[in-house]
Amino acid sequence: MKPIISISGLTKTYASGFKALKGIDLDIRPGEIFALLGPNGAGKTTLINIICGIVNRTAGSVLADGHDVVRDYRAARSLIGLVPQELSTDAFETVTSTITFSRGLYGKPPNAALIEKLLRDLSLWDKKNSKIMTLSGGMKRRVMIAKALSHEPKILFLDEPTAGVDVELRRDMWAMVRGLREKGVTIILTTHYIEEAEEMADRVGVIRKGELILVEDKAALMKKLGRKRLRLSLRTRLERIPDALSRFGLELTGGGHELVYSFRSGAEEAGVAALIQSVGDLGLAINDLDTKESSLEEIFVSLVHEPKDAP
Ligand SMILES: Nc1ncnc2c1ncn2[C@@H]1O[C@H](COP(=O)(O)OP(=O)(O)OP(=O)(O)O)[C@@H](O)[C@H]1O
């Protein structure tokens, strides 16, 4: 399938000489939710801002549905909506007029029904005549989303959409993002809440120091790098791990009452049956057992973690 966004050899060196992006190659598939993860300062916002035409690239190319975002910027921008990290709204305007104006900026004809729907979906309808400056931070963020969607973009960028928002708004946003995807909108989001990427994304990209170090299907990533832990609670207390169990690489925890077995999800599950058999052969009674899967967060931390002695 033809990518909806195609990035190749993209670099950005700021005027200060700082290299924020060092040769990014990335294709975004139409209709997917792509989560871009990375520590502070990795280059996520720079990348998004270049695609959206807010920051100039140093080298490389970015095509949005075949349109070069610099040479053919009008066509490219009309396809794209951006909810930026920083809230910037017209304080003295009303909610409806700022959104109506935003749609007009893209040369789209007025569409009151569409704007009403957007405001209702974002729980802003009863604030439609309020001045933006009178709204709470969470409501201002909803306004930013309505603005970004006002010209019916095919591609939506959400830069840290849920930073500092309450649980309810976060849930509303997730529902809204899913609804947009169902309509075929492609969504690229950056987030520091890894659980958000785990919940929402089809694919995950990890950027570190201006380089894309991984792009992977989320489910495959979790399968490949994820680990499971099996905890066995024993009736008797052990002083140490019995020799007969040494091959499993267990940890003894819970004051000698728990054995913990760590294994790769999907790969080493056969070891579980062997372990339980061996524990039984030793005459150790198991009171309880549970398993825990590593989260995308644990995987992410292991990916971006750098050894302390790295240059
Ligand atoms: N205008 C600028 N001039 C010089 N350096 C800049 C400029 N804008 C950003 N940078 C630097 O580029 C790097 C990448 O910044 P960017 O905002 O893209 O990171 P990010 O991954 O979005 O971070 P965060 O998660 O903190 O939002 C940072 O080191 C930042 O200081």
Image (cartoon, helix red, strand yellow):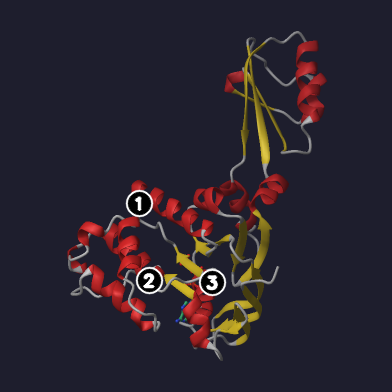
Q: CA distance from mark 3 to mark 1?
A: 26 Å
Percent across and percent down for residue 77 are 48, 81
* Residue 47 in picture, x, y percent from top left: 54, 74
Task: Answer with the quarter of the image where residue 266 lies.
Answer: top right
Q: Secondary structure at mark 1?
A: helix
**Mark 2 crowdedness (10 Å alpha carbons): few <14, some 14-19, many ≥20:** many
Amino acid carrying label 1: it is Leu
Task: Measuring from the top left, give residue 169's x and y in whole percent.
Answer: 35, 51
Res. 311 visible in picture:
no
Q: Earlier in the sequence, mark 3 or mark 1?
A: 3
Q: Earlier in the sequence, mark 3 or mark 2?
A: 3
Q: Which mark is residue 150?
A: 2
- The amino acid sitting under disc 2 is Ser
Figure quadrant of residue 242? top right
**Amino acid residing under circle 3:** Gly
**Residue displayed at 82% across by 28% down:** 247
Quarter of the N terminus within the rendering: bottom right
The residue identified by callout 3 is: 43
* Residue at numbered disc 1: 169
| Above-or-below relation of 1 to 33 | below
The residue at the point 25 percent across, 75 percent down is 90
